[in-house]
Amino acid sequence: MVSRSLPPGRHEIEWRIRPVSLLQKVLLLRSRLPAGMTVGLSLGSFQAWRIVLLLSLLLTVPGSPEASDPFGLQGRVPRTAQQGGVFALTLRPASWIEGLRGSFDNQPLIFSDVGAGRIQALVGIDLEAAGRRLLRLEGKDPQGRAHVRKWPIRVRPRRFAAQRLTLPQHMVELDPETATRVSEEAGRLKALWKAVTPERLWRGAFLSPVISGAKPEGFGLRRIINNQPRSPHSGADYKAAPGSVVRAPNAARVAMAEEQFFGGNALVLDHGLGLYTIYFHLQEFTVKTGDVVQKGQEVGRVGATGRATGPHLHFGVRLNGARIDPAALLRLPLL
């Protein structure tokens, strides 16, 4: 350590040290300096007191969770989310982390490799979710110590439109045979939402299923028929001329193509990792169950089959069972 004489009122202490001991000595020195004294540092012949000052200031700030985050969170986790919303959780985990897994609202997250050492999972908020939900990540280091991070997310309520209808009772109540059919069709769809293809088939952002430029409408619409609330509208409707092309918004496998009572010609695409898109009231299919389709490929034509008041496309999204606003998925930047 070298002390040099300076003009009255100023003092400087200069260290010629090895870089490996820099931070330890700066910390010790800062706690013992008299008032009015500054610290300078020479590495070789270069005086770097500004660098020391910056380092000392940084050392007073507690490290952020991200700075020592073994999960390598990319970006931020939202503090709030809307009903029917969806966001992407991207991580670049440390190479030593083991058994990494995550959950949202106690439902497991499904991660996939998106390149450059990153993994990504989609997180969906059901259209009727409410209150506080918890996002959780956990894993272990090679010594078996657990590492856990948690983020509370508040679900913001949305104001959905409501539609009141008064109809003759025979148009509302189903006869026993039809009721049985509807129940069986609903059961097949529910079974699909529970099935998770372990492979991510989609790549990049999702396209609109119609090329007309029409905007999706009616997601979450509450129908009240004869003063009796019905299930909210879980998809969005696209106005389009009959026979208009319906295209796959991303790569997928056809999970279902069948005629149903309410949905008419109903098509379901499995994009993998619990993500499904749904198409009702089609005039016709141009694919069949089991086909692999590419992004932008024609899969059907707009129609008015099933319980429909006119030609349109009902477009729905399910993510690990959650009913997602299709517009939210289409806005999402994905890798």
Image (cartoon, rainbow, N blue to C red):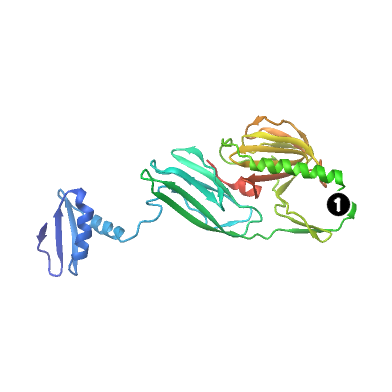
Q: Is residue 207 left or right of residue 97?
A: right
Which of the 4 quarters of the picture holds residue 190? Answer: top right
Q: Position of residue 3 (x, y in %)?
A: 10, 60
Specify whether residue 310 is in view: no
Residue 299 location in percent, x, y?
Answer: 70, 34
Give the residue at x 17% y 52%: 42
- Judged left or right of residue 314, residue 120 is left
Residue 158: % across, % down: 65, 59
Q: Say few, some or many: other residues with alpha carbon within 10 Å of mark 1 (under 14 / 14 to 19 / 20 or more).
A: few
Provide the residue designation for mark 1: 173
Q: Is residue 262 above or below residue 76?
A: above
Residue located at (63% from left, 32% from top) = 294
At label 1, which amino acid type do we have? Glu
Among the 4 quarters of the image, the one containing residue 240: top right
Residue drawn at point x = 22 percent, y = 55 percent: 24
Q: Is residue 229 above or below residue 176?
A: below
The residue depicted at 86 percent of the width and 43 percent of the height is 177
The mark tally for this picture is 1
* Mark 1, secondary structure of its residue: loop
From the viewer's side, name the closer residue of 32 and 178: 178
In the displayed structure image, the side of residue 307 where residue 296 appears, left or right: left
Above or below, 220 relative to 308: below
Which quadrant is home to the N terminus?
bottom left
Q: Is residue 174 left or right of residue 285?
A: right
Q: Is residue 58 visible?
A: yes
Where residue 247 sits, quadrant-wise, is top right
Give coordinates of residue 11: x percent, y percent.
Answer: 14, 65
